[in-house]
């Protein structure tokens, strides 16, 4: 690789470290023009294009790499993965499966492709294969938030509560670069202990659609609590107040400031003292732990 090409590659790596994938692709693309046969550059571009879901470009780079380096299994896997992912995104799950299988034949322990293969199998109603692929992906990367959420979605749709509900808790893992601050919320998070003579706060999370979906569990929760306070999106407050007159309804106060998501609980001063709190999306898990089966059509 020429010194000039190497300098652009180093600039691309620096952009990646700064989280700027678009700039990194630009630098690597320039380096590729200066060193068109360099396998490391082609590998990097194929990975970045795939990361950005630019499947056609990922396929083109992999195809070039395979032509220049026919014995490189990584390029063969990348080409098949790009085609399979493109077909899957277009809704052609059955056509995508052979390509995804080819990618996995080249790289069997590839979590990203195992997840894609699981999705394709699920869409084709091959549940056994879908679960096998997804379980293997999670086994390889047990702390991967995206993989655990993908498995949660699949399992909950099938009514498989364990480990579906446990996987769904991974949504609470902070996103890279985002800090969540709950100001004025000093009580412990509810772990399922008896709340019959105590006050529980259910905090809002996600969007209004998710809050409506999980609000269905509040009726099951209500008999378990001495008092119940529910925080929600402002537009939802009138509906919940009418539907659940026994529940104290509060409107959430939150703002984004740079990389901080700040949730203000100063309003709790006007309510009874709370003993514990829980996110509304975690209610199905807590109720399941107490022997109440969720309704999979509501999840």
Image: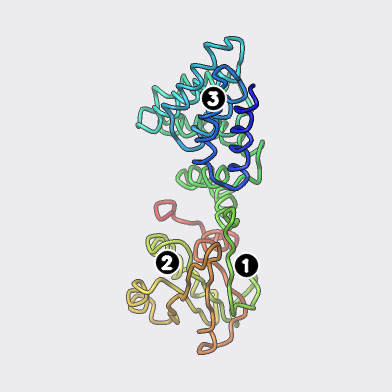
Name the mark on residue 274. none
In the rendered view, would you say 134 is above or below 61?
A: below
Number of the front mark, 1 or 3: 3
Marks 1 and 3: CB-CB under 8 Å? no
Secondary element type, mark 1: loop
Residue 272, image x and y in percent? 54, 88
Marks 1 and 2: CB-CB under 8 Å? no
Q: CA distance from mark 2 to mark 3?
A: 53 Å
Residue 214, image x and y in percent? 44, 62
Residue linked to disc 1: 192
Residue 27, image x and y in percent? 54, 35
Neighbour tally class for label 1: few under 14, some 14-19, many 20 plus, Cα within 10 Å: some
Neighbour tally class for label 3: few under 14, some 14-19, many 20 plus, Cα within 10 Å: many
In the rendered view, would you say 33 is above or below 168?
A: above
Most distant residue in the front direction: 4
Position of residue 206 in the picture relative to residue 161 (left or right): left
* Mark sitting earlier along the chain (1/3): 3
In the rendered view, would you say 208 is above or below 195?
A: above
Residue linked to disc 2: 215
Neighbour tally class for label 2: few under 14, some 14-19, many 20 plus, Cα within 10 Å: many
Residue 44, image x and y in percent? 58, 29
* Mark sitting earlier along the chain (2/3): 3
Name the mark on residue 32. 3
The N terminus, quarter of image: top right
- Of residue 29 and residue 228, the one placed in the foreground of this image is 29
Number of the front mark, 1 or 2: 2
């Amino acid at each position: 690789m020429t010194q000039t090409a190497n300098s652009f590659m180093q600039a691309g790596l620096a952009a990646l470290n700064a989280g700027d994938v678009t700039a990194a692709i630009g630098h690597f693309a320039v380096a590729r023009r200066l060193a068109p046969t360099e396998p490391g550059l082609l590998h990097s571009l194929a990975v970045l294009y795939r990361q950005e879901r630019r499947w056609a470009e990922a396929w083109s780079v992999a195809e070039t790499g395979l032509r220049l380096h026919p014995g490189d299994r990584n390029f063969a896997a990348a080409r098949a993965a790009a085609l399979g992912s493109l077909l899957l995104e277009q809704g052609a799950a059955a056509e995508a499966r052979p390509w995804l299988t080819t990618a996995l034949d080249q790289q069997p322990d590839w979590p990203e492709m195992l997840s894609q293969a699981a999705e394709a199998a699920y869409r084709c109603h091959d549940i056994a294969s879908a679960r096998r692929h997804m379980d293997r992906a999670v086994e390889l990367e047990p702390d991967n938030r995206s993989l655990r959420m993908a498995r949660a979605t699949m399992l909950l749709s099938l009514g498989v509560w364990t480990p579906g509900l446990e996987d769904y808790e991974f949504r609470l893992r902070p996103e890279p670069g985002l800090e969540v601050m709950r100001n004025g919320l000093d009580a412990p998070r509810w772990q399922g202990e008896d709340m019959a003579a105590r006050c529980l706060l259910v905090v809002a999370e996600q969007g209004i659609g998710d809050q409506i979906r999980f609000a269905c569990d509040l009726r099951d929760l209500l008999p378990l609590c001495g008092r119940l306070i529910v925080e929600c999106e402002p537009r939802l407050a009138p509906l919940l107040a009418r539907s659940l007159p026994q529940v104290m309804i509060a409107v959430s106060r939150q703002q984004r400031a740079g990389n901080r998501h700040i949730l203000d609980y100063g309003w709790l001063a006007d309510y009874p003292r709370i003993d514990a709190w829980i996110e509304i999306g975690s209610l199905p898990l807590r109720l399941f732990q107490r022997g109440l089966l969720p309704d999979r059509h509501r999840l």
